[in-house]
Amino acid sequence: MIVRELELDLDAFEGPFDLLLALVLKEELDLRDVDLAGIVTAFLERLAERDDLDLEACGEFLVLIAALLELKARALFPEEAAGLAELEPEEAAEELARRLAEYRRAKEAAEWLRERLAAEGDRYFRLGPAPLAPKVETPLAPQEPESLARVLRLLAQDPPEVSLSHMALRFPPVSQFLERFRALLQRRSRFDFDAEVGDMTRLEQASAFLAVLELRRAGELAIEQAAPFAPIRVSRVAQENNDQQERTAAWTVRSA
């Protein structure tokens, strides 16, 4: 397939690819109006009609379409291409011919390499020294047995014990909360556990809850909770029966 004879049907041009190149190089056709994607699509459709892949035609087409893309980019972005010398039609034609010549040289070199591979592909070359070559022995550096024994003794020592003290959880003593809740119940008949421990840390809250459970086990106080996850109400045992009658509307709302 000859690429230059590729028939094109574009919005700005209709005819063979060779004529399009000639009009562009002579500046009789503005390359900015040419749909280069349509040229690629036409070439791929023509290529799909053939049974075998024509690598030579593909390479020639890539060179031509790359040159057109460069020329169109210069025309679309004049500010970025201001530093580049403007090519005259003759210079553009020479540049295109030079690129085609470079492509042909690369193609001939690839063909030559393919022929060499086919002719000499069954030859193998030895990469190492010959079998009868004398072996080179690398002399060892002077050794010090005392240094080796000293290093072995260091390796035999037990490693230092790793301290995990920084990872231990330090719970506040439960006894201080026992005294605190006993004194609180002496002043008040009942209190809200969440309100009393709201400003404490998690560890302090855990110790305070253990203190409440300990006092409950000893029978010194009573615990009430209207629903799961509702506020915990703590009261003196002597006031437990009276407290059942003294629930206010505010306490019921908070429990809900």
Image: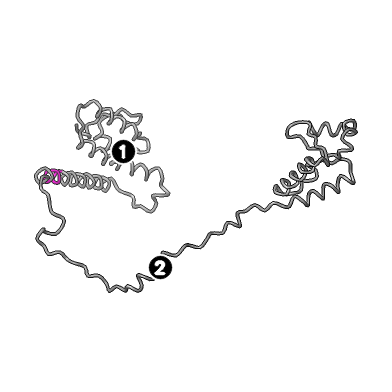
Three-letter code, disc 2: Arg
Residue 191, compared with residue 151, is above or below; it is above
In screen coordinates, is 92 left or right of 105? right
Q: Which labelled disc corresponds to residue 100?
A: none
Q: Position of residue 13 (x, y in %)?
A: 32, 31
Viewer-proximal residue among 246 and 50: 246
- Numbered marks: total: 2
Percent across and percent down for residue 231 are 78, 37
> Helix, strand or loop at disc 1?
loop
Q: Quadrant of residue 42?
A: top left
Residue 114 included in the magenta stretch of the image: yes
Q: What residue is drawn where x is 28% and y is 27%? A: 45
Residue that mark 1 sits on: 28
Q: Nearer the viewer, residue 6 or 47?
A: 47
Most common secondary structure along the magenta stretch = helix
Q: Residues within 10 Å of mark 1 (few under 14, many from 20)?
A: few
The answer to whether the residue labelled 2 contacts the one labelled 1, judged by CB atoms less than 8 Å apart, is no
Quarter containing the N terminus = top left
Q: Which residues are magenta?
A: 111-116
Q: Nearer the viewer, residue 208 or 32?
A: 208
Q: Secondary structure at mark 2?
A: helix
Q: Residue furthest top?
A: 49
Of marks 2 and 1, which one's residue comes earlier in the chain? Answer: 1
Q: Residue furthest front?
A: 218
The residue that appears at 23% across and 36% down in the rendered structure is 58
Residue 148 falls in which quadrant of the image? Answer: bottom left
Position of 59 compared to 252: left or right?
A: left
Residue designated by label 2: 153
Task: Inspect the image, locate mark 1, and give the three-letter code of the amino acid beneath it.
Answer: Glu
Give residue 57's position: percent from left, percent from top. Answer: 21, 36
